Image (cartoon, coloured by chain):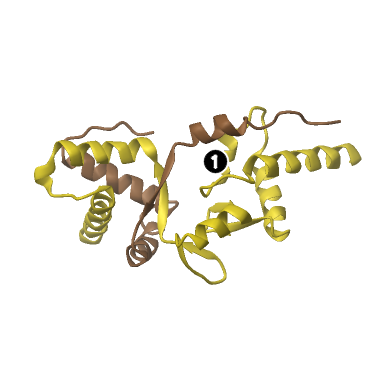
Amino acid sequence: MVVLGIFMPKTIAKSEAEYVFVKIPKSLLEEVDRVIGKHGYRSRTEFVKDAIRSLLREYGVYRSEE
Amino acid sequence: MEMRLIVKDDLKRQLLEFIEELEEPFNIEFIMRNCLKPVSRIEIHDILCELVDEGRIVRVDGEYYMPVKPLIRRWLRGKIRRVRDEVILDGLELPKSLVEDVRELIRSRAELGYLDEAEFIRDAIRRKLKSLREN
């Protein structure tokens, strides 16, 4: 028995990944690590996405949650 | 039982083929999004653990993984600064659409004084940390 075609072709997967790598100082990420658990964030990424959306909202850029 | 092992081996082979040339760190959610057929999260997690044990991929920064070859390429390019028990990335994977929103804001509101998206993101993190400390 062979499981065929479980994953998308790589070309499609790459185009749909749509993630970019953003450099952030390690000292800042360490600060994030210290607070995420206490405030209900599951990961650094979740915290940073929330922080970005909050500041965008502050500047009047509305963005619906993904 | 034997059939189940064959299926798992095939799933593992296909998963490795799928991820081996990915240049960016990926997590289980990324793999789940790219499954054309239903595969359980636990199965994927188990296979990723096996691949880590076999030295084919490396767990980076907690929830993310990278295949060894792209990881070494990235390291050689200086994107990773140091390695301890785990590889520590000096950055994060963020949705392109969100970063595009930031870039658009910086372009359209030059008076805010942000030079690039990284500066905006650092400011956003600092403000969020400050607000959590105050509340």
Viewer-nearest residue: A49 or B114: B114
Residue on which the image places disc 1: B29
Please tell me which residue is depicted at 82% across the width and 31% down the height of the picture: A2
Question: Can you give x and y, in whole percent of width and height, for residue A19 in the image?
Answer: 44, 41
Locate the C terminus of chain B by quadrant: bottom left
Q: Chain B is drawn in which colour?
A: yellow
Q: Residue furthest right?
A: B2
Question: Can you give x and y, in whole percent of width and height, for residue B133 in the image?
Answer: 24, 61
Residue B67 visible in the displayed image:
no
Question: Can you give x and y, in whole percent of width and height, for residue B123 in the image?
Answer: 22, 54
**Chain letter for the residue marked with disc 1 in the picture:** B
Question: Can you give x and y, in whole percent of width and height, for residue B30 in the image?
Answer: 54, 40
| Total marks placed | 1
Label 1 element class? helix
User: Does A30 sit above or below residue B19?
Assistant: below
Left/right placement of residue B18 relative to residue B74 reads right
Please tell me which residue is depicted at 62% across the width and 56% down the height of the picture: B68
Which chain is drawn using brown? A
Q: Residue furthest left?
A: B111
Viewer-nearest residue: B75 or A42: B75
Q: Which image quadrant is residue B55 in?
A: bottom right
Left/right placement of residue A11 relative to residue A63 reads right
Left/right placement of residue B47 relative to residue B60 reads right
Query: What kind of residue is marked 1?
Result: Glu
User: Does A16 sit above or below residue B121?
Assistant: above
